[in-house]
Image: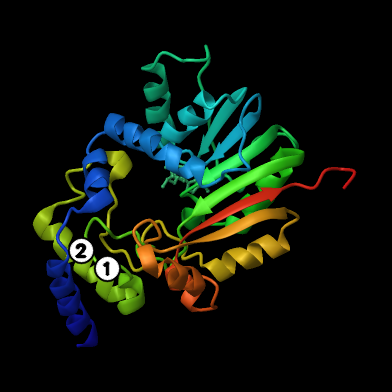
Amino acid sequence: MRVKLEEKLIFFLNKLFRRPYGSFGELVAAKTGAGSYFQWEFAQAERSYSAFQPYINLKGKDVLDVGCGLGGKTLFHLQKGAKSVTGLDISQTNAQIAQSCFAGREPESGQRPGLVVADAAAMPFADGSFDLAISTYTFEHLADPAGVLGEIHRVIKPGGEVFISFPPYFSPWGAHLTDWIYFPWCQVLFSEKALLNAARAIEETQHIHASLPDFARVDLTGAVELPHVNKLTVRDFERLLKASSLEVLSKIHRPVGVEKAGMLRPFLSLATKIPVLREAFTSGVVLIGRKPAQND
Ligand SMILES: C[S@@+](CC[C@H](N)C(=O)[O-])C[C@H]1O[C@@H](n2cnc3c(N)ncnc32)[C@H](O)[C@@H]1O
């Protein structure tokens, strides 16, 4: 009874927020083809990269891209002057697409990124193989984020840097249901069961994902939990960091809507500093970390 009422409210709110809008429109269009999604990742890379300024400098470095997806950002890192870039992803499908996207482009620096299919919690690399590791929009998907942080620490050299950004679970779109449910913070307002029922009902009538290629399709049939998200919160990540051996050089909680906030910006920034509120008002966590050098 309660779930049914929630579902009705979800449909009502969905009608108030028209789809696709803003950057979600671009994302929906990008998902319809592997090439267009690769291009979309590549176009987004500048934004991800600038969040790591002024710390990031890839020139002459051996770089690991953890959770590289279709490789658009992996290629971007190479074009930023890295000596080598290795993309690592658990999905064979994604890595195959990345491989063919790289092959279809003339490499600017005379080389292409490398690709490895593996679980980032058990990386097939020797200790200290890379100068630095980057991971964007991936930590919220990992089954074992603590294990991955440990592996990143192991495979970078002493003194090497780590660049991580991800949207925490209670951020506006942290449920990762935007293809079906178009209003923000749906996971704060409604139960998981109601969200999944509503998303399934929308999929049944609109076939949003049924028509997407394999790499982008999410099957909600029989799902009892939100697919592909580990519900990593700002607080969870703080705890992971404390338990890790990484030194934190910078940790930013990017406030929701910061680009368009105008006069509200100081209030939104303040909200990201207040426990509990910070969970909902942080759109992205940006970490710049370092593996202590041997003589530190
Ligand atoms: C949303 S994509 C992010 C792609 C890219 N980094 C970006 O910023 O656009 C997340 C990627 O993480 C990968 N992934 C999830 N769990 C993983 C794991 N345990 N090990 C390696 N990759 C993983 C997924 O297959 C997916 O390609």
Q: In which quadrant of the rendered image does the N terminus lie?
A: bottom left
Question: Label 2: few (<14), some or many (≥20) within 10 Å?
Answer: some
Q: Nearer the viewer, residue 174 or 150?
A: 174
Q: Residue at x 36, y 59 (%)?
A: 227
- Please tell me the numbered disc located at residue 28: none
Q: Is residue 120 above or below residue 12?
A: above
Question: Label 1: few (<14), some or many (≥20) within 10 Å?
Answer: many
Helix, strand or loop at disc 1?
Answer: helix
Q: Is residue 135 visible?
A: yes
State the count of labels.
2
Q: Residue at x 39, y 40 (%)?
A: 44
Which residue does the numbered mark 1 point to in the structure image?
196
- Residue 218: % across, % down: 29, 51
- The residue at the far right in this view is 295
- Residue 166: % across, % down: 49, 54
Quick check: marks 2 and 1 in contact, CB under 8 Å?
yes
Q: What amino acid is labelled 1 in the image?
A: Leu
Q: Is residue 114 visible?
A: no
Q: What amino acid is labelled 2 in the image?
A: Arg
Which residue does the numbered mark 2 point to in the structure image?
200
Q: Residue at x 39, y 33 (%)?
A: 42
Q: Quadrant of residue 245?
A: bottom right
